[in-house]
């Protein structure tokens, strides 16, 4: 029994006439009659009671009508579901993000636009350290990640595409003498206890630039992978943090922000994903973000 047999049967049952059913199906009547007889032979009994004017369903035919409609409806649902999955309209996208990625607004805008375009795709969002994102993507536990460039993004099988770039700020307790200045130069950081992110390549390059400018007066006091930890340490007066500009949106009592002058280096945000991706939903998300 094939789906076409069910469609032939349904047409005859609904039309009550082999001739009209054949016209509806765009086949010749003898071929239709032969297919119905083959179906009845396979099932072991008559589905129609034939008269000179019309055909009527037998009791077995009435049961067959219910099941044929149900089966054809399920087959159509399966077809549409698979087609939608192939177009990326259903499925799941697992998104990882480093703590500071959310403050730029880029990630939340991307998620909102994708959800509006593909409301039936499930979005799973998880905060994760930058280096762990790459490992999770390679392990199939994550699909895409938002993170600053780091030592893991050069891994084989991973694409890291820049999607954002911002200047650096200096964050410190607002009772420090630095607060009297509208902006901060690298020389004003001499001897200050600096707080940097760990495992961010761009901060390592920033550190090298400051080393060239400050020499022995460069003092790296602490490193942290947590955005809130970096800001909390600075607000407590335990050091001066160097952070991406979008973080100035975070209001912490007693914390002041100032631009860092005379440094031709920007913090970045990367979209990280597999080079070989099979999911249409994930591909659609990546296209939407990278344009």
Image (cartoon, rainbow, N blue to C red):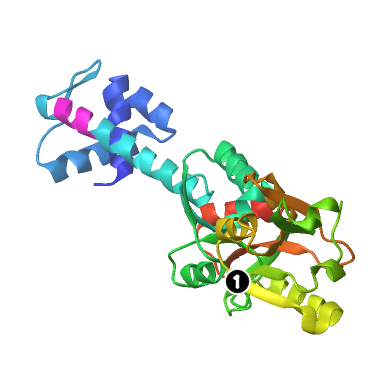
State whether the magenta stretch is mostly helix, strand or loop: helix
Above/below status of 183 relative to 56: below
| Residue nearest the viewer, comparing 184 with 4 | 184
Q: Is 156 placed left or right of 29 in the picture? A: right
Question: Is residue 45 toward the left or the right of residue 259 in the image?
Answer: left
Q: Position of residue 26 (x, y in %)?
A: 44, 33
Residue found at the far bottom of this picture: 216
Looking at the image, the residue that sits furthest to the right is 262
Q: Please provide the residue range marked out in magenta.
A: 61-67
Left or right: 167 with respect to 282?
right
Image point (70%, 57%), residue name: 172
Residue assigned mark 1: 223
Write the residue at 38% across / 30% down. 22
Q: Is residue 114 visible?
A: yes
- The relative height of residue 187 versus residue 52 in the rendered view (above or below) is below
Say if 246 sits above or below 76 in the image: below
Q: Secondary structure at mark 1?
A: strand
Q: Is residue 66 magenta?
A: yes
Q: Position of residue 120 (x, y in %)?
A: 47, 40
Can residue 106 be seen? no
Q: Where on the picture, by quarter, is residue 225?
A: bottom right
Pinpoint residue 84: horizontal percent, then vertical percent.
48, 45
Determine the residue positioned at 64% across, 49% down.
103
Quarter where residue 40 is shown: top left
Q: Nearer the viewer, residue 95 or 269?
A: 269
Q: Is residue 120 magenta?
A: no
The residue nearer to you, when weighing 248 against 191, is 191
């Amino acid at each position: 029994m094939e789906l076409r047999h069910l469609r032939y049967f349904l047409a005859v049952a609904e039309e009550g006439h082999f001739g009209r059913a054949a016209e509806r199906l765009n086949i010749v009547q003898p071929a239709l009659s032969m297919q119905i007889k083959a179906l009845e032979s396979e099932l072991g009994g008559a589905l129609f009671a034939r008269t000179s004017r019309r055909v009527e369903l037998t009791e077995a035919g009435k049961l067959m009508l219910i099941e044929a409609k149900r089966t054809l409806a399920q087959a159509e649902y399966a077809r549409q579901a698979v087609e939608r999955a192939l177009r990326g309209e259903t499925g799941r996208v697992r998104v990882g993000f480093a703590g500071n990625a959310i403050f730029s607004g880029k990630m939340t805008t991307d998620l909102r636009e994708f959800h509006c375009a593909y409301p039936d795709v499930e979005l799973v969002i998880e905060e994760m350290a930058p280096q762990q994102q790459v490992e999770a993507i390679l392990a199939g536990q994550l699909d895409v990640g938002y993170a600053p460039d780091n030592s893991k993004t050069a891994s084989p099988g991973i694409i890291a595409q820049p999607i954002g770039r911002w200047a650096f700020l200096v964050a410190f307790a607002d009772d420090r003498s630095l607060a009297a200045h509208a902006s901060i130069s690298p020389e004003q950081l001499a001897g200050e206890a600096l707080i940097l992110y760990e495992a961010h390549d761009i901060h390592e390059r920033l550190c090298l630039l400051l080393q060239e400018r400050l020499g022995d007066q460069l003092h790296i006091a602490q490193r942290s992978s947590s955005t809130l930890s970096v800001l909390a340490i600075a607000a407590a007066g335990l050091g001066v943090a160097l952070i991406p500009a979008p973080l100035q949106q975070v209001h912490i009592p007693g914390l002041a922000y100032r631009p860092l002058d005379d440094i031709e280096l920007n913090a970045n945000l990367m979209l990280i994903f597999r080079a070989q991706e099979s999911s249409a939903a994930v591909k659609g998300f990546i296209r939407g973000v990278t344009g």
